Amino acid sequence: MTLSLFATSYTYAQEAQRLDFEGFYQLALQKSGRMLESTAQLGISEARREMARAPAMPSVQLEAIAGPSPTFTGNAIRSDTTFDAWGAAFQSKVEVIQPLYAFGALQKLRDAARVAHEAEGGRHEREKLLLRQDVAKLYYGYQLAFDLREICRDLLEQMKKAKEQGEKMRERAAKGAPSETDLDRINMVVAELSSRFEEAQKFMDQARLGMSVETGSYGNTEELRWRRANLKRRESEFKDIEFYKNIAHTKRPEFQALRKEIEAREVLADAESARSYPLLFVGARWTYATNTASADQPSVFANDPFNSNSVVAGLGLKWSIYSADARSKSATARAEAIKTRSKNEFLLRSLDAELEKNWAELKFLRLSVDQKELVVRSARRVYMDMAGGFALGTQRAKDLLESMGALAMSQKAFLEATFEEHLAWVRLESSLGETIGATSL
């Protein structure tokens, strides 16, 4: 019973590491270095949004200084300083300011930070879609390499059998036995297939390594595994371009981010201009000073900086009437807003063109894969006929090798087109800003 439970647990642990495309993608979202960086940038944007709220909050400043002081004697009319005796002096000032009204300047700063944060959110979502494309290349690239390797393995076995049959036919001097040249041709094909097999294995290893890096799993003891190794076509309904355009205009992150970036630049330009607006505030200041080596002046008309205790509170106005630096920053921000609007409006138009390009490419690839699948079926039938004829001595090795080459090339073309079809689906989804009901592969 114990052994059975252990085996079940071990099997479950092994199967838990087998991931489909969505599984790898979700893992990459959590651990990919680029996503961690993008998330951190989003956090910085949120911090800047909090900073934009700071000017409207109360501020408290404290200044204090203490040190030795010579003795001061006398009054407001006549005074003397004696350096033979020393004491301690202390001065402090506490100032509290609460902004009340800035004629819209504070609100413009908050609006600029808010819109900039929304634009950063759109860029973050776009980074997710770019990551999805990279994960797709690795995931389906591994499947492509696996299938190509299996094709090489299968053909190697058949070529080795054909060679054995040919050698036996030559030993028996059977009718239709292959010549030495025919056997050499088979040996050449076996060597080529062996090389292709190792090449496919290399691509599988590279895909594993790339996926481990992309998902932040490089260096872990547990190896990530594909739930399905062989490449299958995706089963998703393909619709007309207008259907996808409607989705893209509401869901695609770039549409949101580019518009928000335009808005953020324009609001920021307004905020820079608003820095020259007056600021109305309520404030209070408490000043306290004492000196053990100086007598306090009893008259309120005496200016005694060494012994004082005063409080002032009221309504204040701060207004930078002219600042060359502020005017320069405002002009720069306005120019950046104009530049961003021109650039982003062009990019917004380009997004529709990109969507149409991806849609047309996928439409072509779907038809291409259908045709290549038919070619594979025909090539397989021809090869099976040639293989059977070679075994009976009615077909030459040259014909067998040509049919085998045609089958291998048709299978390779079909798998490569299927691989490109998967990537085209992912690119189309990136153009839309969301997935569109793919089956797990």
Image: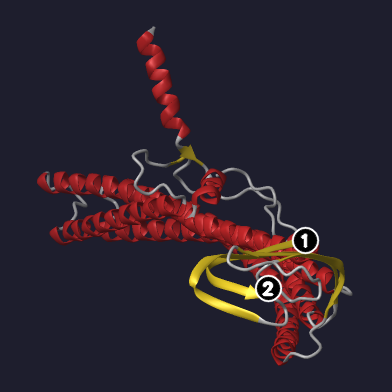
Crowd band around label 1 with a 10 angstrom C-alpha radius: few (<14), some (14–19), many (20+): few
Assign a secondary structure to mark 2: loop
Foreground pick, 379 / 61 = 61
Q: In this view, does 328 lie above or below 403?
A: below
In the rendered structure, which disc, 1 or 2, sits on the residue that comes first in sequence?
1
Disc 2 marks a residue whose amino acid type is Pro
Residue 192: give x, y in percent of width and height.
25, 60
At 75% from the left and 59% from the top, the residue drawn is: 251
Does the image show residue 402? yes
Disc 1 marks a residue whose amino acid type is Met
Assign a secondary structure to mark 1: loop
The residue under label 1 is: 57
Query: How many numbered markers are drawn?
Result: 2
Seen in the image, is 373 located left or right of residue 150? Answer: right
| Viewport quadrant of the C terminus | top right
Give the label, 1 or 2, closer to the camera. Answer: 2
At 36% from the left and 43% from the top, the residue drawn is: 220
What's the distance in space between the residues labelled 1 and 2, CA to CA?
A: 32 Å
The residue under label 2 is: 305
Find the residue positioned furthest to the top: 1
